[in-house]
Image (cartoon, rainbow, N blue to C red):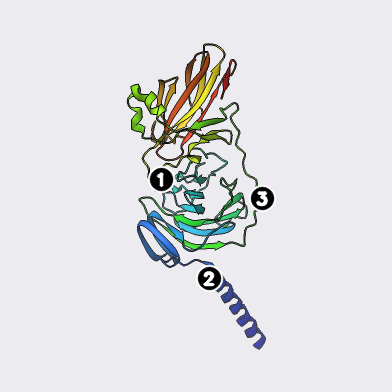
Amino acid sequence: MKLRATINLTFCITLFCVQQSFSQNIIPLDTLHWKIEAKSYVLETYKDQASIYLQRGAITLKDETFLNGTIEYDVHLKQNVRGFPGVHFRVYDANAEEFYIRPHQSGNPDANQATPITNGITPWQFYFGPKYSFPYHYKFDDWTHVKLVVNNDRAQVFLDYSDTPNLSWKLFHKAKAGEVRFTGGNNQALHIANIVIDKEKDVIKDFMPIEREPIEGLVPSWEISDKFEESLLTDHTKLTSVIESRTWGKEITIEEGTAANISRQVELRDGKPGNTVFAKITIHSDRPQTKLFDFGYSDRVVAILNGQPIYKGTNNFRSRDYRYLGTIGLFDAIYLDLKKGENMLFMAVSEDFGGWLITGKFQDNSGIKIK
């Protein structure tokens, strides 16, 4: 009897220690540990968990940086409510890595998203498809558990204590320690709880990222101007003076065989006016000829060939119907009337959100060279 009592006591002490160890790893949700920036929030117990009810905002861990390790948390999702709860990690300046959930897309191929934040822009219109999203049926009557494992240039996500990763992907920025930030619901608030960050657990397993098929023959790079106000494009008779007043010298190159990311070189929301840049290529033609140029852009574009506007288009979120995403691809085309010698093609690209992008290719490169 005495032996059984001793065993039971030992078991209880061990269990208590394990629970205490786990609870000590959970970062308390309070203003001592977190900088809270939101339209509104409530610190409360919800579904038996100490949580934050967060509306249109974020919480950032104070006095800590994160490079490699594991980030875990619970989120209580709302059904049929548009929102993008997630985690930003390695946040520095206006750059970060991000994973977030789209609860309103439960069961769909884009039920979630892995993406970078580049100079303040989250280019999900660029990083889409099975390489960066996976279908998942969320539960709306209980907590969803999210675990991220990060190691140098690799990351994985495990939902609801899965033994195998739901998604593996290569990270977008060079590995650099930065802040950790959690985002909540949009207009509809939601609960976040049980945040644990362990910098020692950084083991990646079964790393099998999905490859993206590149588009062959794309213009490899574009020269980029400084940014300016889109309204300067309204008067087509003054486009030459707008071009001549720009400063140049920055270059963007094609990434993932898909498109060039303007936000690599230009910060949209830096406090200075402007949401538009010129992306420029020089086309040398050995004779007068007409060439078909397939291209893509985000969000809006005005195409100018040798000083003359030849195209204006819109490709932003919901611009064509209520389900339209505005993702990048070779969905438009123009016939370029090239003269013999050098021809200057300017694409004035304007951005709202979701990706500041340009891409293009000639179906037939005979008789031309691109500088």
| Circle 2: residue type | Gln
- The vertical placement of 293 against 25, above or below, is above
Residue 118, percent from left and from top: 49, 44
**17 sits to left or right of 182:** right
Residue 13, percent from left and from top: 59, 79
Mark 2 and mark 3: Cα distance apart in space: 30 Å
**The residue tagged with tag 1: helix, strand or loop?**
loop
From the image, tell me which residue sits under label 2. Answer: 24
| Circle 1: residue type | Asp
Classify residue 35 by image quadrant.
Answer: bottom left
From the image, tell me which residue sits under label 3. Answer: 206
Q: Is residue 1 visible?
A: no
Residue 96, percent from left and from top: 51, 50
> What residue is drawn where x is 54% and y is 67%?
25
From the image, tell me which residue sits under label 1. Answer: 270
Looking at the image, the residue that sits furthest to the bottom is 2
110 or 136, which lies in front? 110
Whether tag 1 and tag 3 are in contact, CB under 8 A, the answer is: no
Instruction: Please state which of the two labelled residues, at mark 2 or mark 3, is closer to the viewer.
Output: 2
Mark 1 and mark 3: Cα distance apart in space: 40 Å
69 or 48, which lies in front? 69
> What residue is drawn where x is 55% and y is 11%?
287
